[in-house]
Amino acid sequence: MELYGQDKMKVLLTGATGFIGGNIARKLCENGFETKVLVRENSNILNIEKLPVIISYGDLCDKNSLQKALKGCNGLFHTAAKYSFWAKNPESFYKVNVEGTKNIINAAIEAGVEKIVYTSSESTIKLPGKNESSNKSNKNNQKINHYEIDDINCVAGDYKKSKILAELEVLKMIEKKWPVIIINPTTPIGPGDVKPTPTGKIILDYLNREMPAYVNTGLNIVDVEDVAIGHILAFQKAKIGKRYIIGNKNLTLKQIFEILENITKIKAPKVEIPLWIAKLLGYIDEFFSGKVLKKYPKIPVAAVKAAYKYRFFDCSKDIEELGIELTPVEISFEKAIKWFKDNRYVKN
C-alpha cells in the first residue's frame, strides 16, 4: 500500500498512549506527519516515549487544554476512549466517550482543522437476527446497520452504550457538513496493548495459563497496525462523511485458542462453558469482586452478554476502497505474543 509523506501536515492525535492510538502515532511519524499528541498527566507513555512527537498535556474534559493542543494543527485523529467492560463509576464512560468526543471535535472545528478522523467501534454496528443465542445467522453478515438511540436499552454494558451515543453525536456533526470521517475497527490485536484491552487480556490470560475454558462466541480479528494504516489512508483519501469498518478474519473463540496453541505450544482449553452459566458466574463475580472488593471482575457481565452474538463482518469493500494490505491473523497473534513477552506481561 502507498502512504504519502506529509512533511507539511501537522496533526493532533488523542489516545496516543493507548493501543490503537499508539500504533497510529508510530505510523504518522514514519510517514512524515508532524505529530502532536494529547496526553493526560501521569499517563503511561510506553507507546510514544521513543517517538518524535510533540506532547501537549491536557484532558478531553478540559476545553482550554484542547484549544491549546489544536493550535496550528491541520488535522485531528481522535482515538481516545475509555474501553472496558466494567468500571467502578459507569458515568466515566459517558464523560470520556461522549462528552469528551463532543469537546474535542467542537474545539477542532473552532481551530479550523481541515479533516478529522474519529475512531468509533464495531460495537456500534447492529447485527441481524432476533435470537441472540443463534450464531449462525451472523456468520456471513453482509448488511451493516448501526444502532439508533431507541436501541440503547438493549445494548450490553456502558462502554458499548457510550460508543453508540458518541457516534450518534458525530453523525449529527457530519450532517452539518463538518469534515469528519468515521472508522469502526473490529477487534485489533498486536503490539502496544499496554492496558491491556479486553481482547489482549484473553491472549495474556492464555499465555499465563489462566484460561481453563471457553464460550461459544466469535470475533473479527484484525492487526492493530493495519488499523493504524487504515486511519492514515482514510485521512489522505476518504471523502468527508464516509464510514469504514476495518477488519480482517472472522474466528470463533475456539479457533483463536487453536491458533494460540499452534504458536505457543500451550494446550488450548477443551471445555466449553454454556453462555448462561458464564453469565451467572459473571453476576456472582461482579458482586464479590466489583461491589465488595472494589476491583475489576474476571468475568464482566457485559463481556458475556456481548458474546451471545458472533461479531462477524465482511469488511472487504471498505478494505479495498482504502487500499489496506491485510496482515495474516496468525502473524498478528505472533506479534501480540512477542510484545507481551518482551514487555514482561507474561509470568513465566
Image (cartoon, grey):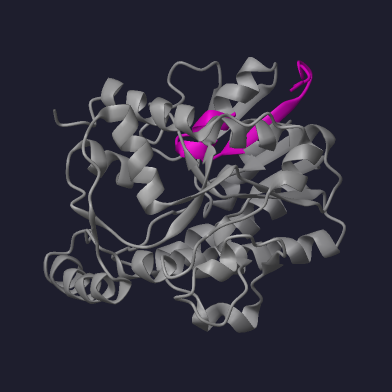
Q: Quadrant of the N terminus?
A: top right
Query: Does residue 240 appear left or right of residue 156 in this picture?
Result: right
Percent of width and height locating residue 57: 49, 36
Name the residue rendered at 24%, 30% in the picture: 265
The quadrant holding residue 41 is top left
Percent of width and height locating residue 272: 26, 61
Q: Which is more toward the observer, 181 or 2?
A: 2
Q: Quadrant of the C terminus?
A: top left
Name the residue rendered at 69%, 39% in the picture: 76
Query: Does residue 255 appear left or right of residue 66 in this picture?
Result: left
Q: What's drawn in magenta, residue-wise?
A: 1-24
Name the residue rendered at 23%, 52% in the picture: 270
Residue 11 included in the magenta stretch of the image: yes
Name the residue rendered at 43%, 29% in the picture: 191
Q: Which is more toward the observer, 340 or 316?
A: 316
Query: Does residue 190 appear left or right of residue 283 in this picture?
Result: right
Q: Which is more toward the observer, 36 or 198?
A: 198
The quadrant holding residue 4 is top right
Percent of width and height locating residue 208: 18, 38
How many marks the image carries: the answer is 0
Query: Does residue 28 appear left or right of residue 136 in this picture?
Result: right
Residue 16 included in the magenta stretch of the image: yes
Q: Is residue 343 above or below residue 62?
A: above
Residue 234 visible in the shown view: yes
Q: Is residue 93 above or below residue 270?
A: below
Residue 111 visible in the shown view: no
Percent of width and height locating residue 217: 41, 61
